[in-house]
């Protein structure tokens, strides 16, 4: 079309300007489109329909600048524009100004679109096994709503005797920290090992070997983690269950939520507005610049937490959310970063390590470290930079490979934890543990029982976890929609995953054995059928993508 327009302009210079301008615009559009598809799995026009930005503090141009700088590399943009300019010039010379007309260009474009559409549908639907057809018997669409403020009062009671309660409870949530992540400067050392070393007392920490996330999406995972409601449960349950902050506040703790990312996303600000949080700090609190995705420098919330630790004289309950490891990774910080670290992920890992060291030192200065319960966990994992598996190219938001499903999970129990609780915690080291277990663990420690018909779907780490428990992860539910939904069911080392690339894929976690794999796969499928949100999600995946 550009060639046609330039050919119908009499002055050669005007035609060249039209051709060059069009090629530059097409180059910019193609670069943005390719970058979006690489990181999010779809075009910007598809993604935009699912993005919810709930606040007015951060303007759209500011968000755009924040994303474009790391996601659209300038040299790649220049290379794509140069390629478009070269192709336009060659085509113009080859075709000549008199031989191309709108009458030829428009049918050619329409024919190309028609051929593309036919090729897209040429594959046909994947045939279903008998046990899989049951998913299609339910309506594919679930009810939708948004995260909102809700009254959660009167939903729990305090036990007559709660036993020992630590003076300090700290949860560090590391964005996108998979269990496999290495330390910043030592590929042979895992991040989990480095964090334990930074504490100065690595033997004090426990690292369970089989931990899974409840969602590959932060705005689904974090509300679930801080309430104990499964991501596969109803929105009504999510908006009735008390926050972990409410439990701690009822026991006399000073409570704090410190976020390196903004809460003005998917209505998280409204969702947490009714929580019993004494100190709330987020990316928008002090107007610091966004440096990574929708997050500020991790140093700011860490410094805020250091101040809170130093000034607090009574019990303290704090949640610190670090954002450095979110793609495309924080590369600059107020924290010093070794000059030898050049790639963005290694630099982000260095920031994360420094944040942990600073927090541990602050707890020790205040005399809180020894008897503190500290959990360093992740909301979900992330794809590796390089891997031979084809699934490494699939966006994290619809990818429940073990890179994403298995997360960082470290526990330092308080020194005076009752022996029965400590023994159960050690015994659960090889059991399947999920993020949704955090809230019931805290309720158990604080001596809190739920009321009003509520119950946690997870398990306390201070009680034996059933060996056959099934954990569910989903990227979409009643409070979040996405163009490419995905689910995962885990039982021990078994995995049943479903997305638009692999329909109901089963992995036993052991060498294949047809005699046992088929019935065990069928039992996980039956479990999925009993969960309405998972059932509807699988039906939608098949109808939309297969």
Image (cartoon, grey):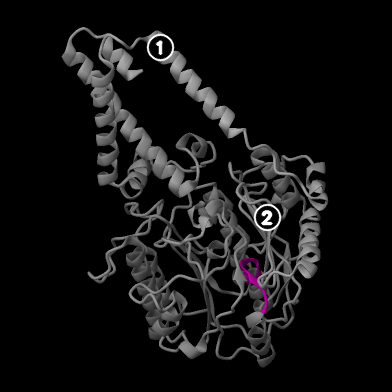
- Few, some or many residues within 10 Å of mark 2 (<14, 14–19, 20+): many
Q: Residue at x 36, y 41 (%)?
A: 64
Residue 331 image offset from top left, x and y in percent: 31, 60
Q: Secondary structure at mark 1?
A: helix
Q: Is residue 57 visible?
A: no
Residue at 45% from the left image edge and 37% from the top image edge: 44
Disc 1 target residue: 104
Disc marking residue 348? none
- Image side of residue 71 versus residue 208, left or right: left
Q: Residues within 10 Å of mark 1 (few under 14, many from 20)?
A: few
Provide the residue span drawn in magenta.
431-438
Numbered disc 2: secondary structure: helix
Q: Is residue 7 above or below residue 441?
A: above
Q: Position of residue 307 (x, y in %)?
A: 37, 72
* Residue at 44 percent of width and 76 percent of height: 190
Relative to residue 11, is residue 241 depicted above or below? below
Identify the image quadrant of residue 541. Answer: top right
Distance from Cα at disc 2 to Cα at disc 1: 58 Å
The residue identified by callout 2 is 238
């Amino acid at each position: 079309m550009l060639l046609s327009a330039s050919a119908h302009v009499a002055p050669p210079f005007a035609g060249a300007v039209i051709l060059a301008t069009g090629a530059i615009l097409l180059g910019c559009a193609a670069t943005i489109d390719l970058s979006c598809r690489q990181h999010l799995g779809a075009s910007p026009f598809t993604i935009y329909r699912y993005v919810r930005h709930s606040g007015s503090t951060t303007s759209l141009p500011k968000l755009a600048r924040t994303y474009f700088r790391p996601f659209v590399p300038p040299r790649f943009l220049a290379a794509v524009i140069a390629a478009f300019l070269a192709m336009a010039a060659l085509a113009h010379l080859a075709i000549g100004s008199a031989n191309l007309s709108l009458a030829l260009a428009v049918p050619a474009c329409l024919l190309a679109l028609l051929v593309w559409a036919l090729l897209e549908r040429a594959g046909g639907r994947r045939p279903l096994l008998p046990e899989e057809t049951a998913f299609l018997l339910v309506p594919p669409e679930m009810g939708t709503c948004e995260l909102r403020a809700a009254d959660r009062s009167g939903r729990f009671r305090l036990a007559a005797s709660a036993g020992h309660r630590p003076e300090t409870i700290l949860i560090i949530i590391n964005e996108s920290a998979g269990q496999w992540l290495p330390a910043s400067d030592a590929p042979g050392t895992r991040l989990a090992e480095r964090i334990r070393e930074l504490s100065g007392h690595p033997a004090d920490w426990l690292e369970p070997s089989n931990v899974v996330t409840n969602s590959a999406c932060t705005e689904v995972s974090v509300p679930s983690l801080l309430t104990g409601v499964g991501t596969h449960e109803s929105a009504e349950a999510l908006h009735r269950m008390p926050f972990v902050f409410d439990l701690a506040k009822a026991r006399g703790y000073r409570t704090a939520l410190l976020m390196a990312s903004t809460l003005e996303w998917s209505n998280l600000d409204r969702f947490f507005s009714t929580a019993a949080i004494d100190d709330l700090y987020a990316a928008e609190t002090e107007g610091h610049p966004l440096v990574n995705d929708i997050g500020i420098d991790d140093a700011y919330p860490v410094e805020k937490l250091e101040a809170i630790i130093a000034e607090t004289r009574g019990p303290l309950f704090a949640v610190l959310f670090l954002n450095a490891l979110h793609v495309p990774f924080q590369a600059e910080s107020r924290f010093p970063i070794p000059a030898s670290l050049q790639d963005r992920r290694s630099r982000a890992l260095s920031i994360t390590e420094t944040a942990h060291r600073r927090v541990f030192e602050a707890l020790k200065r205040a005399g809180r470290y020894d008897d503190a319960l500290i959990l360093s966990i992740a909301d979900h994992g992330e794809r590796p930079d390089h891997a031979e598996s084809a699934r490494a190219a699939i966006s994290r938001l619809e990818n429940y490979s073990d890179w994403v499903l298995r997360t960082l999970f470290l526990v330092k129990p308080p020194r005076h934890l009752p022996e029965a609780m400590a023994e159960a915690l050690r015994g659960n080291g090889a059991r399947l543990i999920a993020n949704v277990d955090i809230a019931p663990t805290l309720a158990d420690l604080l001596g809190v029982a739920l009321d009003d018909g509520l119950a946690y779907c997870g398990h306390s780490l201070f009680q034996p976890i059933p060996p056959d428990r099934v954990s569910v992860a989903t990227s979409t539910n009643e409070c979040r929609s996405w163009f490419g939904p995905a689910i995962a069911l885990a039982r021990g080392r078994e995995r049943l995953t479903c997305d638009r690339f692999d329909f109901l894929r089963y992995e036993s976690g052991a060498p294949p054995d047809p005699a046992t794999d088929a019935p065990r796969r069928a039992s996980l499928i039956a479990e999925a059928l009993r969960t309405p949100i998972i059932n509807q999600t699988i039906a939608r995946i098949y109808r939309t993508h297969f």
